[in-house]
Amino acid sequence: MADYKKPDYWQLKARKEGYPARSVYKLQEMDEKFGLLKPGKAFRVLDLGAAPGSWSLYVLRKMRGSVFLAAADISPLSRQYDAGLFNGDNFCFIQGDITDPAVRDSILAQGPYHLIISDAAPATTGNRFIDTTRSLELAEAVAAYTESALTSGGNLVIKVFQGGDVSALLKRLRTLFKSAKSYKPEACRSESFETYYLALGKK
Ligand SMILES: C[S@@+](CC[C@H](N)C(=O)[O-])C[C@H]1O[C@@H](n2cnc3c(N)ncnc32)[C@H](O)[C@@H]1O
């Protein structure tokens, strides 16, 4: 069994580079491979399940002033490394449950977005059936955002726990986007059953 208390390579790197979570390297890899963030354009991004805030910080650091970013999470963001970036006019944080209709309305009011990224994950129980079912419900809620909040041609990244009926979600994404596939970045723990669905080019 993995020792999650001992910082691994990615955690140490995150600390050194000023990110509150190792998950930043998953987004960085997907961005570098699939060209998700396009600097220099007036680009609008939505980050769902954003806390403690590494993905949001990556977007704001890479895109500087040329992005508007809306982020949402039940939990607050960590302010340890943001150096004021989370106070900028080009950033908006909505604290709440993304499946709550009032939260959804606030998120939609800031849109539409060119890119939706979601690392949202339920608190795990250790029961694989419960965890995959909750993860799929969350991923489906994220996919529903694309229908009203994503621009035509826009891209989507969603985290899913493998298992359950995730293939139905992938099929649905293939009807909404020009392409959709599963991708597991290197920074995912090898024993983890998480993966990401990358859906590119909203129809
Ligand atoms: C793995 S963490 C995200 C890490 C983040 N990408 C980062 O780089 O810092 C998953 C997040 O999903 C959030 N989450 C889970 N269910 C949610 C929901 N229904 N609404 C909003 N956020 C949710 C959790 O609170 C948690 O902060």
Image (tube, rainbow, N blue to C red):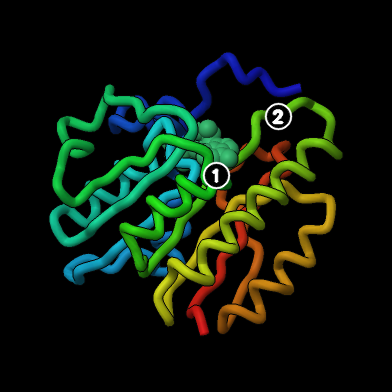
> Disc number at residue 100?
1
Residue at the farthest top position: 5
Whether residue 23 is visible here, answered yes or no, is no
Residue 63 percent coordinates (x, y): 22, 57
The yes-or-no answer for disc 1 within 8 Å of ligand 1 is: yes
Q: Secondary structure at mark 1?
A: loop
Of badges 2 and 1, the one in the foreground is 1
Report the residue at 48% width, 79% height from top: 201
In this picture, residue 99 sits left or right of residue 93 = right
Q: Which mark is residue 144?
A: none
Q: Position of residue 161 (x, y in %)?
A: 71, 46
Residue appearing at x 38%, y 31% in the figure: 14
Within-10-Å neighbours for mark 2: few <14, some 14–19, many 20+:
few
* Residue 62 left/right relative to 19: left
Q: Position of residue 26 (x, y in %)?
A: 49, 48
Give the structural element (helix, strand or loop) at label 2: loop
Q: Is residue 1 above or below residue 143?
A: above
Quadrant occupied by the N terminus: top right
Task: Name the residue rendered at 37%, 46% in the picture.
Answer: 71
Q: Looking at numbered disc 1 in the image, what kind of residue is underneath it?
A: Asp
Q: Position of residue 134 (x, y in %)?
A: 73, 42
Question: 21 or 155: nearer the eye?
Answer: 155
Query: Quick check: can you spot residue 113?
Result: yes
Task: Judge by depth and name the residue closer to the eye, 163 or 123.
Answer: 123
Q: Which mark is residue 124?
A: 2
Q: State the residue at coordinates (24%, 57%).
A: 68
Instruction: Pick whichever of labels 2 and 1 is earlier in the sequence.
Output: 1
Query: Label 2 is placed on what type of residue?
Result: Thr
